[in-house]
Image: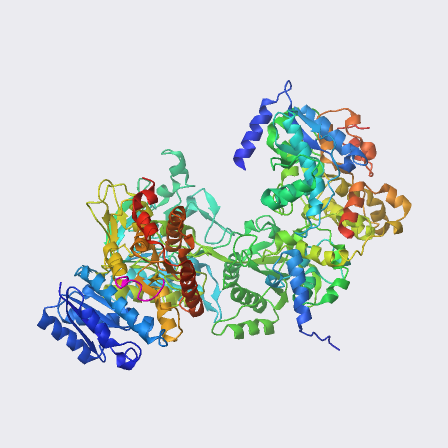
């Protein structure tokens, strides 16, 4: 059975929050899909980048449950190609920040095997810690 | 841009073998550990060109990435502190008034330049950050962050070719750019879709740059920490496309890209039996090689995929460690 | 001066609120008024006859009608004065209906006082009105059409058939434009060449058209009725009278270059015929690649030797021709987007990526049985290349690409059903007649539409096949598949020659880079330059039916002007007080239409080019410039008249300068809507607020005004370029002076309006009124000090 989409004031609030946090006019996205076609991490994602934006446009908080923004590498391929001039990377950041600012971390250093940890260059560890912790 | 380049070129021209041009230089953490090969080869090659990269005193980690949210000002504090160091260096007369701060690591470049752009654009933000770091001098916005490749671009093809003692003999190299060197457009040092800066440098060194569409695709960056598999798949594609285009080696100028593309080849090999190992070198290592510098400048021992076989197969045998 | 004043009841509309008898009586007491009366309906036949009779009987030489808005019945009364033998410009109307009786219906006594003030203001103005005569200029029947594509051809043929003399100038060696390169046209699939050829042939056949191909416009000076045109005919090095296009020269020519008509898919020789059905159908030599012409007299010349008719002449020189025309039609068309700017699509690098225009040529040749290259297997069309793309700086939609892709795709599918044809789009725009049906036909033919904008193309180094990376946004799946051929549906950009002709004619550009029409709804083929029209894609991307429609529309607009035999110059133009002028020339620099020319001494102002905006007035440091019908003296006299009775019981008086285009009209709309606002407001009509100089404003304050609001049309709806900026500067200047004199700068304001902002107008007026009431009137001594050394305060003397 097809999912139901309910349009309500709660939805508007979520869109407003992400718009404010990202500083981007999310409603200008016309869902062309260029960002998805450019994303290097798309193979692992459950929703595509443009789908992620669509869910934000519709105010669907469920987007926060997806893996997509956590798999984002902030490489900006989407941003430099968006025909509407939207900074898609910033929107992904905003979606991460909603969770991270609740002091929920998305990296568990303890779960990483010691030998891997020893080998990883600081740049990788610091980068991951910066991006994935609140 | 043109007049800036012209002035830069003029400055560098004045520095012959007797007088060196000095730049404040920000290494970043990784260059002191796993990426010592990048630093060693770069500093040595710079010297050949009459450039002295003077390390900033008391520099701190730039933070690698910042939160992209506009209200996360705190992430810009660490980068700006480094800019203050460069400012102090200039004020102390150590770098002949040079306003440019040179980085070797693409990621540090991107992070420092972004923070710099932020405080240059917003006097309010600059004020807030300066007030926060009340123990430091105020940053006056007078530093420009550049990547070493930009400095080399200003030196120019001719002067670099002149310095080449052992041309790379048409070695087919796929220059890998990654993302932080090129994007976003306001920060990037070249066209994000069709960059040529590394290609041009390789040509000046006598190598044959091999174009391929994955040269600007992100290596996966910090995802290596928790999503090794995904990064391995990406690296596989990046290396494969370079191989298909005819490349024998790949160059990069970012320690994270180097790690992701080089180190991951172990895992790639396990997942994808058709993968052929490809040496991933820092472009400065090739430069040091071409300049005929001694092996300790290149530190090939720190590269994960051994380039020995490749280099032996070229006329560069006997030059490497 | 003998002034007659008429106060209209307007059938009760005015008289129910305003005591019209009192107004007439007060008017009658004014100096120079020899008669003043009230009447029921001034605009009626009888009312107008009243004026005509009174002019004769009382020897009136000026008339004031206090009634409805001059924008409503102004024209009527101007005609009345003409009938009475007076200049229509010695008429003033006091707006005591829309701007008095109606908005102040709830305050009849204030309304009456205001009506008296307004009438006095009109009397003060009319005393200084000059009996201007509309100068008429003759206008002939000669037209220049720039551009020989289908728009220019259509316009030229319409004009030629209508008996007008047409000079059609085309920079390429043949007319026909982009349409000549097309295969079939959507949605009917007519063969482009078949329907275009007869039209092209008609052009030289028309005795009224002088067709100048391979010719460029060098300069155009002058105005409507006398555009002096200089064109340069480029040398073809072939005598067209003798050349029969036999082709023997081409056989011998050793130089091969890419053929531009074939979009580089084939080659042509240095000596060539533009294309199969070109008009003229003669050879010409491309001087940039011809060996003889580039290297010297002793080189090559094989074509000349081969020519049996001796048609080749290497000594041909460019020829200048000058002629005068009355109107100009600009039809310089489009060029396709340069796809190399979109590096991700690999155009120019990848073997199997072509543009849609190249595909048109490929289809034409394939249909003739001479395919240029095979089109096999899987083909994809990529939409929106260079359009709707902020990364390349083209935000606009090119309008035709969705349809031409649907056309090319179904042509390909029908001619070989084994082909797999895909169209990657973001939106499919099929808005025209027969378009949706045609798109459906493409779908039923088996063309597959994928909703996803292509992110990148990759080329397989061995097979040269092209991989498309995109998201099918409808199913959220990522596509990374190989295609044998990719066609880029490139957008439309202004043609190369557009910039040059726009500079020559000083034509404005729209934000998208195409040329700007005078009004997007009502004047789509006019420009703001009188006598110059646009037709076709130069005004914006469009398909053939719309282009042809505009070609005919432009010729019709030109004919409309020219058929009248003469045109009237609006006398509301700037003029110079020669005794005050010191020849500094700042006015000439400030004028946005180039109407003012000055070498030394007093400048000359072209009435034809002057739009009456008044920007030059503020540029003059010596107040030497003025505006007919709205002179400085007139406006100040009106202000003085408004303050004759002090403030009439009000604490303060607010002056509103309302521009014709928006604010005055808006004030009328507010009145018509019976929306009340403060009665201490006095509205003065001006063509544009730019006319209100800082000096005028300071003098008005000196005379007793407590607040000034300038209302001007928003730039995008304004016929006056630069007015908003000019007014902004003037108001800033005045604010600065007020502040230095200890007067609150908030007393002077500037607001941009559009005619529907009723609430905003009321808000602004009431706002300023309340502000002034709160501060109180400006103290007398401060007014006096303000008035001293105004020039010094403004120009730092």
Residue at far top of view: B18
Is residue C593 among the parts visible in the rendering? no
Q: Residue at x 28, y 59 (%)?
A: C639
- In the rendering, at what x and y percent does residue C630 appear? 25, 58
Q: Is residue C153 above or below residue B307?
A: below
Image quadrant of residue C709?
A: bottom left
Q: Residue at x 37, y 33 (%)?
A: C298
Residue at far bottom of view: C11
- In the rendering, at what x and y percent does residue C127 appear? 18, 61
Side (left or right) of B231 relative to C385 = right
- The image quadrant where one finds the C terminus of chain C is top left
Look at the magenta stretch and give its main secondary structure. Answer: loop
Identify the image's colour scheme: rainbow, by chain, secondary structure or one colour: rainbow
Residue at far right of view: A114
Side (left or right) of C470 relative to C64 = right
> Which of C440 and C305 lies nearest the eye of the viewer?
C440
- In the rendering, at what x and y percent does residue C283 appear? 37, 50
- The image quadrant where one finds the N terminus of chain C is bottom left
Q: Is residue C342 above or below residue A28?
A: above
Span of residues in magenta: C642-651
Q: Is residue C208 above or below residue B6?
A: below
Image quadrant of residue B261?
A: top right
Side (left or right) of B249 relative to C766 = right
Q: Residue at x 48, y 54 (%)?
A: C262
Q: Residue at x 54, y 37 (%)?
A: B1
Image quadrant of residue A103?
A: bottom right
State yes or no: residue B193 in magenta: no
Is residue C63 among the parts visible in the rendering? yes
- In the rendering, at what x and y percent does residue C536 appear? 40, 62
> Which of C580 and C434 lies nearest the eye of the viewer?
C580
């Amino acid at each position: 059975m097809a999912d139901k989409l309910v349009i309500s004031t709660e939805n508007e609030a979520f869109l407003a929050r992400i718009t404010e946090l990202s500083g981007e006019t999310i409603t200008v996205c016309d869902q062309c899909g260029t960002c998805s076609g450019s994303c290097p991490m798309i193979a692992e994602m459950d929703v595509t980048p443009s789908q992620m934006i669509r869910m934000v446009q519709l105010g669907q908080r469920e987007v926060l449950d997806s893996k997509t923004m956590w798999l984002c590498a902030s490489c900006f391929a989407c941003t430099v190609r968006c025909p509407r001039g939207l900074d898609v990377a910033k929107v992904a950041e905003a979606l991460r920040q909603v969770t991270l600012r609740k002091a929920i971390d998305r990296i568990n250093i303890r779960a990483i095997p010691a030998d891997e940890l020893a080998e990883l260059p600081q740049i990788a560890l610091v980068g991951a810690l910066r991006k994935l912790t609140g | 841009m043109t007049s800036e380049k012209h002035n830069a070129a003029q400055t560098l021209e004045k520095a012959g073998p007797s007088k060196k041009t000095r730049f404040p230089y920000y290494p970043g953490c990784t260059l002191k550990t796993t990426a010592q090969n990048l630093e060693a080869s770069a500093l040595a090659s710079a010297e050949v060109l009459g450039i002295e990269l003077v390390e900033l005193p008391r520099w701190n980690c730039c933070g690698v990435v910042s939160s992209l949210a506009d209200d996360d000002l705190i992430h810009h504090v660490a980068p700006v502190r480094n800019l203050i160091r460069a400012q102090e260096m200039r004020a102390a007369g150590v770098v002949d008034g040079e306003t440019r701060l040179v980085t070797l690591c693409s990621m540090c470049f991107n992070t420092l330049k972004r923070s710099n752009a932020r405080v240059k654009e917003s006097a309010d933000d600059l004020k807030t950050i300066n007030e926060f770091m009340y123990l430091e001098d105020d940053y006056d916005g007078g530093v420009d962050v550049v990547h070493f490749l930009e400095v080399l671009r200003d030196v120019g093809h001719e002067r670099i070719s002149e310095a080449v003692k052992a041309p790379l003999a048409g070695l087919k190299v796929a220059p890998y750019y990654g993302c932080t060197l090129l994007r976003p457009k306001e920060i990037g040092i070249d066209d994000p879709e069709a960059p040529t800066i590394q290609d041009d440098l390789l040509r000046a060194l006598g190598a044959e740059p091999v174009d391929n569409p994955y040269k600007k695709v992100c290596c996966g960056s910090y995802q290596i920490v928790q999503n090794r598999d995904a990064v391995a798949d990406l690296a596989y594609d990046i290396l494969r496309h370079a191989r298909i285009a005819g490349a024998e080696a790949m160059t990069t100028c970012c320690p994270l890209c180097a790690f992701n593309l080089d180190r991951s080849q172990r895992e790639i090999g396990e997942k994808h039996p058709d993968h052929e190992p490809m040496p991933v070198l820092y472009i400065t290592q090739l430069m040091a090689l071409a300049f005929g510098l001694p092996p300790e400048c290149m530190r090939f021992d720190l590269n994960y995929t051994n380039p020995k076989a490749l280099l032996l197969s070229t006329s560069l045998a006997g030059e490497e460690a | 001066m003998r002034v007659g004043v008429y106060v209209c009841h307007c059938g009760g509309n005015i008289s129910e609120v305003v005591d019209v008898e009192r107004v007439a009586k007060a008017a009658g007491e004014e100096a120079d008024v020899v008669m003043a009366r009230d009447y029921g309906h001034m605009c009626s036949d009888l009312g107008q006859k009243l004026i005509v009779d009174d002019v004769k009987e009382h020897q009136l030489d000026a008339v004031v009608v206090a009634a409805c808005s001059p924008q409503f019945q102004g024209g009527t009364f101007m005609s009345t004065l003409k009938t009475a033998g007076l200049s229509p410009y010695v008429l003033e109307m006091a707006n005591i209906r829309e701007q008095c009786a109606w908005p102040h219906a709830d305050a009849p006594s204030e309304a009456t006082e205001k009506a008296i003030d307004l009438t006095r203001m009109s009397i003060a103005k009319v005393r200084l009105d000059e009996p201007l005569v509309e100068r008429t200029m003759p206008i002939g029947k000669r037209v220049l059409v720039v551009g020989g594509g289908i728009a220019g051809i259509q316009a030229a043929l319409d004009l030629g058939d209508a008996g007008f003399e047409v000079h059609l100038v085309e920079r390429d060696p043949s007319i026909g434009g982009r349409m000549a390169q097309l295969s079939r046209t959507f949605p009917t699939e007519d063969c482009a060449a078949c329907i275009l050829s007869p039209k092209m042939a008609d052009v030289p056949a028309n005795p009224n058209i002088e067709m100048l191909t391979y010719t460029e416009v060098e300069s155009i000076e002058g105005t409507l009725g006398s555009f002096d045109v200089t064109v340069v005919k480029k040398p073809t090095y072939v005598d067209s009278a003798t050349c029969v296009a036999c082709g023997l020269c081409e056989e011998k020519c050793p130089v091969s270059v890419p053929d531009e008509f074939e979009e580089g898919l084939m080659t042509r020789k240095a000596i060539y015929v533009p294309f199969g059905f070109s008009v003229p159908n003669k050879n010409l030599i491309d001087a940039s690649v011809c060996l003889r012409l580039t290297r010297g007299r002793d080189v090559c010349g094989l074509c000349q030797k081969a020519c049996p008719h001796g048609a080749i002449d290497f000594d041909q020189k460019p020829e200048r021709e000058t002629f005068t025309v009355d109107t100009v039609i600009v039809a310089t068309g489009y060029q396709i987007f340069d796809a190399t700017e979109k590096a991700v699509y690999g155009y120019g690098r990848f073997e199997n990526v072509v543009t849609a225009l190249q595909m048109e040529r490929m289809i034409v040749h394939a249909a003739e049985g001479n395919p240029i290259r095979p089109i096999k297997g899987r083909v994809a069309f990529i939409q929106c290349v260079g359009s709707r793309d902020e990364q390349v700086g083209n935000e606009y939609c090119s309008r035709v690409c969705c349809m031409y892709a649907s056309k090319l795709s179904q042509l390909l599918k029908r001619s070989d059903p084994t082909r797999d044809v895909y169209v990657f789009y973001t939106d499919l725009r099929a808005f025209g007649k027969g378009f949706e049906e045609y798109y459906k036909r493409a779908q039923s033919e088996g063309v597959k539409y994928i909703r996803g904008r292509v992110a990148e193309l990759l080329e397989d180094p061995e097979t040269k096949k092209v991989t498309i990376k995109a998201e099918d946004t409808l199913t959220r799946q990522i596509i990374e598949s190989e295609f044998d051929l990719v066609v880029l549906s490139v957008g439309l950009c202004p043609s190369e020659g557009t910039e040059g002709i726009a500079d020559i004619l000083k034509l404005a550009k729209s934000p998208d880079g195409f040329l700007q029409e005078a009004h997007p709804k009502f004047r789509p083929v006019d420009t703001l330059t009188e006598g110059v029209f646009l037709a076709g894609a130069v005004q914006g991307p469009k398909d053939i039916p719309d282009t042809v429609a505009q070609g005919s529309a432009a010729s019709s607009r030109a004919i409309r002007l020219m058929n009248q035999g003469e045109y009237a110059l609006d006398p509301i133009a700037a003029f110079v007080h020669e005794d005050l002028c010191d020849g500094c020339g700042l006015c000439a620099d400030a004028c946005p239409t180039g109407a003012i020319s000055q070498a030394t001494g007093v400048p000359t102002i072209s009435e034809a080019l002057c739009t009456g905006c008044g920007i030059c007035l503020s540029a003059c440091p010596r107040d030497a410039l003025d505006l007919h019908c709205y002179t400085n003296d007139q406006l100040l006299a009106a202000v003085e008249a408004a303050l004759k009775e002090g403030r009439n019981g009000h604490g303060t008086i607010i002056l509103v300068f309302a521009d014709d285009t928006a604010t005055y009209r808006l004030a009328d709309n507010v009145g018509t809507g019976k929306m009340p606002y403060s009665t201490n407001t006095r509205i003065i009509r001006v063509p544009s607020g730019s006319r209100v100089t800082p000096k005028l404003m300071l003098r008005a304050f000196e005379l007793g005004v407590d607040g000034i609001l300038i209302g001007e049309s928003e730039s995008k709806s304004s016929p006056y370029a630069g007015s908003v900026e000019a007014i902004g500067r003037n108001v800033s200047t005045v604010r600065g002076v007020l502040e230095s004199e200890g007067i609150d700068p908030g007393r002077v304001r500037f607001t941009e309006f559009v005619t529907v902002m009723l609430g905003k107008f009321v808000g602004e007026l009431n706002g300023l009124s309340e502000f002034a009431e709160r501060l109180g009137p400006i103290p007398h001594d401060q007014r006096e000090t303000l008035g001293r050394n105004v020039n010094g305060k403004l120009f730092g003397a």
